[in-house]
Amino acid sequence: MNNLSKRLKAISEFIPNGSEVIDVGTDHALLAIYLNKEKHCQCLATDKSALCIKKAKENIQKYQANVLTKVTDGLKGIDVTGKYIIIAGMGTSTILDIVPSNLDNDFIISSHRNLELLRKQMHKKGYYLYNEKAIYDKRYYVIMHFKKGRKNTNILISPFLKNDKGYMTSLYNEYYKKYQKMPKSLKKIKVYFILKKIKNYL
Protein backbone atom coordinates (compact mmCIF):
# COMPACT_ATOMS: atom_id res chain seq x y z
CA MET A 1 0.00 0.00 0.00
CA ASN A 2 1.37 3.36 -1.01
CA ASN A 3 -1.69 5.56 -0.43
CA LEU A 4 -1.41 5.84 3.35
CA SER A 5 -1.15 9.43 4.61
CA LYS A 6 1.91 10.56 6.54
CA ARG A 7 -0.22 10.75 9.69
CA LEU A 8 -1.53 7.19 9.41
CA LYS A 9 1.93 5.89 8.48
CA ALA A 10 3.34 7.57 11.61
CA ILE A 11 0.62 5.95 13.73
CA SER A 12 1.51 2.54 12.27
CA GLU A 13 5.10 2.98 13.48
CA PHE A 14 3.88 2.82 17.09
CA ILE A 15 2.57 -0.72 16.55
CA PRO A 16 5.02 -3.65 16.83
CA ASN A 17 4.98 -6.33 14.13
CA GLY A 18 2.55 -9.15 14.76
CA SER A 19 0.42 -7.28 17.30
CA GLU A 20 -3.31 -7.62 17.86
CA VAL A 21 -4.90 -4.27 17.12
CA ILE A 22 -8.28 -2.56 17.43
CA ASP A 23 -8.67 0.47 15.13
CA VAL A 24 -11.53 2.45 16.69
CA GLY A 25 -13.39 4.78 14.32
CA THR A 26 -11.62 3.16 11.39
CA ASP A 27 -13.54 5.01 8.65
CA HIS A 28 -11.94 3.55 5.48
CA ALA A 29 -9.85 0.90 7.35
CA LEU A 30 -6.69 1.83 5.42
CA LEU A 31 -4.59 1.86 8.60
CA ALA A 32 -5.86 -1.57 9.69
CA ILE A 33 -5.24 -2.92 6.19
CA TYR A 34 -1.69 -1.54 6.19
CA LEU A 35 -0.95 -3.05 9.61
CA ASN A 36 -2.24 -6.43 8.46
CA LYS A 37 -0.46 -6.47 5.09
CA GLU A 38 2.84 -4.80 6.03
CA LYS A 39 3.26 -5.61 9.74
CA HIS A 40 1.37 -8.93 9.96
CA CYS A 41 -1.00 -7.64 12.65
CA GLN A 42 -4.37 -9.16 13.52
CA CYS A 43 -6.74 -6.22 13.20
CA LEU A 44 -10.31 -5.44 14.12
CA ALA A 45 -11.59 -2.28 12.41
CA THR A 46 -14.60 -0.70 14.15
CA ASP A 47 -16.85 2.26 13.52
CA LYS A 48 -20.25 3.34 14.78
CA SER A 49 -21.25 4.12 11.20
CA ALA A 50 -22.53 1.16 9.17
CA LEU A 51 -21.76 3.16 6.01
CA CYS A 52 -18.09 3.52 7.06
CA ILE A 53 -17.86 -0.21 7.76
CA LYS A 54 -19.35 -0.92 4.32
CA LYS A 55 -16.62 1.25 2.78
CA ALA A 56 -14.02 -0.45 5.02
CA LYS A 57 -15.11 -3.89 3.82
CA GLU A 58 -14.78 -2.76 0.21
CA ASN A 59 -11.20 -1.64 0.87
CA ILE A 60 -10.38 -4.85 2.75
CA GLN A 61 -11.57 -6.87 -0.24
CA LYS A 62 -9.74 -4.58 -2.68
CA TYR A 63 -6.40 -5.04 -0.92
CA GLN A 64 -7.08 -8.71 -0.06
CA ALA A 65 -6.40 -8.08 3.63
CA ASN A 66 -7.38 -10.25 6.58
CA VAL A 67 -9.11 -7.61 8.72
CA LEU A 68 -12.25 -8.14 10.79
CA THR A 69 -14.88 -5.39 11.07
CA LYS A 70 -17.57 -4.48 13.58
CA VAL A 71 -20.21 -1.77 13.80
CA THR A 72 -20.04 -0.52 17.38
CA ASP A 73 -19.65 2.67 19.38
CA GLY A 74 -16.15 2.90 20.83
CA LEU A 75 -15.10 -0.31 22.57
CA LYS A 76 -18.58 -1.61 23.35
CA GLY A 77 -18.93 -5.37 23.00
CA ILE A 78 -15.26 -5.93 22.17
CA ASP A 79 -12.74 -8.22 23.86
CA VAL A 80 -9.74 -5.88 24.26
CA THR A 81 -7.45 -8.29 26.13
CA GLY A 82 -3.82 -7.91 25.07
CA LYS A 83 -4.62 -5.63 22.14
CA TYR A 84 -3.20 -2.29 21.04
CA ILE A 85 -6.04 0.22 20.78
CA ILE A 86 -5.79 2.98 18.18
CA ILE A 87 -8.10 5.99 18.46
CA ALA A 88 -7.32 8.64 15.85
CA GLY A 89 -9.06 11.37 13.92
CA MET A 90 -11.50 12.37 16.67
CA GLY A 91 -11.82 15.25 19.08
CA THR A 92 -10.44 14.98 22.60
CA SER A 93 -13.84 14.81 24.32
CA THR A 94 -14.93 11.91 22.10
CA ILE A 95 -11.67 10.06 22.73
CA LEU A 96 -11.99 10.51 26.49
CA ASP A 97 -15.54 9.17 26.36
CA ILE A 98 -14.22 6.01 24.69
CA VAL A 99 -11.24 5.32 26.97
CA PRO A 100 -12.21 3.65 30.28
CA SER A 101 -9.98 3.85 33.34
CA ASN A 102 -9.83 0.11 34.07
CA LEU A 103 -7.80 -1.29 31.15
CA ASP A 104 -4.15 -2.36 30.92
CA ASN A 105 -3.96 -1.85 27.15
CA ASP A 106 -1.58 0.33 25.19
CA PHE A 107 -3.46 3.25 23.63
CA ILE A 108 -2.20 4.99 20.49
CA ILE A 109 -4.12 8.25 20.31
CA SER A 110 -4.16 11.15 17.87
CA SER A 111 -6.55 14.01 18.55
CA HIS A 112 -7.00 17.09 16.37
CA ARG A 113 -7.25 19.50 19.29
CA ASN A 114 -7.04 20.14 23.06
CA LEU A 115 -3.90 18.06 23.58
CA GLU A 116 -3.21 19.62 26.96
CA LEU A 117 -6.63 18.45 28.18
CA LEU A 118 -6.10 15.01 26.65
CA ARG A 119 -2.81 14.44 28.50
CA LYS A 120 -4.33 15.72 31.74
CA GLN A 121 -7.44 13.54 31.59
CA MET A 122 -5.58 10.41 30.47
CA HIS A 123 -3.32 10.90 33.51
CA LYS A 124 -6.42 11.13 35.71
CA LYS A 125 -7.72 7.89 34.18
CA GLY A 126 -4.50 6.17 35.27
CA TYR A 127 -2.41 6.20 32.07
CA TYR A 128 1.00 7.75 31.51
CA LEU A 129 2.61 9.13 28.36
CA TYR A 130 5.09 6.51 27.18
CA ASN A 131 5.99 8.12 23.86
CA GLU A 132 4.86 10.90 21.58
CA LYS A 133 5.59 12.18 18.08
CA ALA A 134 4.57 15.18 15.99
CA ILE A 135 4.13 14.67 12.26
CA TYR A 136 3.59 17.37 9.65
CA ASP A 137 0.97 16.43 7.04
CA LYS A 138 -0.33 19.79 5.74
CA ARG A 139 -0.57 20.68 9.44
CA TYR A 140 0.95 19.25 12.63
CA TYR A 141 -0.61 16.15 14.17
CA VAL A 142 0.51 14.69 17.50
CA ILE A 143 0.46 10.95 18.12
CA MET A 144 0.52 9.80 21.75
CA HIS A 145 1.30 6.37 23.17
CA PHE A 146 -0.22 5.83 26.62
CA LYS A 147 0.40 2.90 28.95
CA LYS A 148 -1.30 1.99 32.21
CA GLY A 149 0.46 3.38 35.26
CA ARG A 150 1.18 6.47 37.29
CA LYS A 151 4.07 8.65 36.17
CA ASN A 152 4.44 12.41 36.10
CA THR A 153 3.52 13.89 32.72
CA ASN A 154 4.22 17.41 31.52
CA ILE A 155 0.71 18.34 30.46
CA LEU A 156 1.65 21.32 28.29
CA ILE A 157 5.01 20.45 26.74
CA SER A 158 5.79 16.81 26.18
CA PRO A 159 9.42 15.81 26.90
CA PHE A 160 9.26 13.91 23.60
CA LEU A 161 8.41 17.02 21.58
CA LYS A 162 10.33 19.84 23.25
CA ASN A 163 13.28 19.48 20.83
CA ASP A 164 11.08 19.49 17.73
CA LYS A 165 11.58 23.12 16.68
CA GLY A 166 8.98 22.99 13.93
CA TYR A 167 6.27 21.67 16.21
CA MET A 168 7.19 23.98 19.09
CA THR A 169 7.00 26.97 16.72
CA SER A 170 3.56 25.80 15.61
CA LEU A 171 2.47 25.42 19.25
CA TYR A 172 3.77 28.91 20.07
CA ASN A 173 1.84 30.42 17.15
CA GLU A 174 -1.32 28.60 18.23
CA TYR A 175 -1.16 30.02 21.77
CA TYR A 176 -0.11 33.44 20.50
CA LYS A 177 -3.28 33.65 18.38
CA LYS A 178 -5.33 32.75 21.45
CA TYR A 179 -3.47 35.38 23.48
CA GLN A 180 -4.15 38.14 20.94
CA LYS A 181 -7.89 37.44 20.87
CA MET A 182 -8.36 37.27 24.65
CA PRO A 183 -9.54 40.23 26.75
CA LYS A 184 -7.49 41.18 29.78
CA SER A 185 -8.12 38.57 32.44
CA LEU A 186 -6.43 35.97 34.60
CA LYS A 187 -6.79 33.54 31.71
CA LYS A 188 -4.83 35.87 29.46
CA ILE A 189 -2.06 36.08 32.07
CA LYS A 190 -1.97 32.27 32.17
CA VAL A 191 -1.59 32.09 28.38
CA TYR A 192 1.19 34.71 28.57
CA PHE A 193 3.19 32.48 30.92
CA ILE A 194 2.51 29.46 28.68
CA LEU A 195 3.99 31.44 25.77
CA LYS A 196 7.09 32.20 27.86
CA LYS A 197 7.53 28.49 28.64
CA ILE A 198 7.21 27.47 25.01
CA LYS A 199 9.61 30.19 23.89
CA ASN A 200 12.34 28.59 26.01
CA TYR A 201 12.42 25.71 23.51
CA LEU A 202 12.60 27.87 20.37
Image: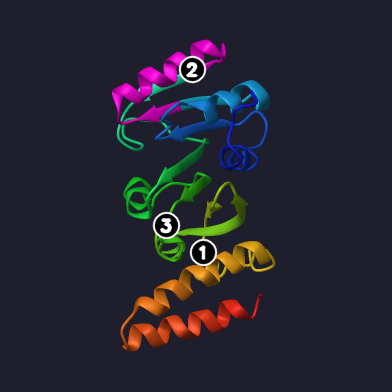
> Residue type at mark 1?
Arg
| Lower sequence index among marks 2 and 3 | 2
Is 49 magenta? The answer is: yes
154 or 100: nearer the viewer: 154
Is residue 95 rendered to the left or right of residue 153?
left
Q: Nearer the viewer, residue 202 or 13?
A: 202
Disc 2 is placed on an element classified as helix
**Residue at (49%, 39%) from the top-left corner?**
85
Which residue position holds label 2? 59
Callout 2–callout 1 Cβ contact below 8 Å: no
Point out which mark residue 113 bears: 3
Q: What residue is rendered at 50% in x and 11% in y?
A: 61
Give the mark, 3 or 1, whose residue is nearer the N terminus: 3
| Residue designated by label 1 | 150
Verify whether residue 60 appears in magenta. Answer: yes
- Please indicate, yes or no, whether residue 82 appears anywhere in the rendered image: yes
Q: Are marks 2 and 3 in contact (CB under 8 Å)?
A: no
Name which residue type carries label 2.
Asn
Can you say whether 193 is above or below 71 in the image? below
Element at badge 3? loop
Q: Residue at x 47, y 33 (%)?
A: 23
Is residue 105 rendered to the left or right of residue 186? right
**Location of residue 191 by image quarter:** bottom left
- Cα separation, mark 3 vs mark 1, equals 24 Å
Q: CA distance from mark 2 to mark 3?
A: 28 Å
Residue type at mark 3: give it: Arg
How many other residues sit within 10 Å of disc 1, few (<14), some (14-19) or many (≥20)?
few
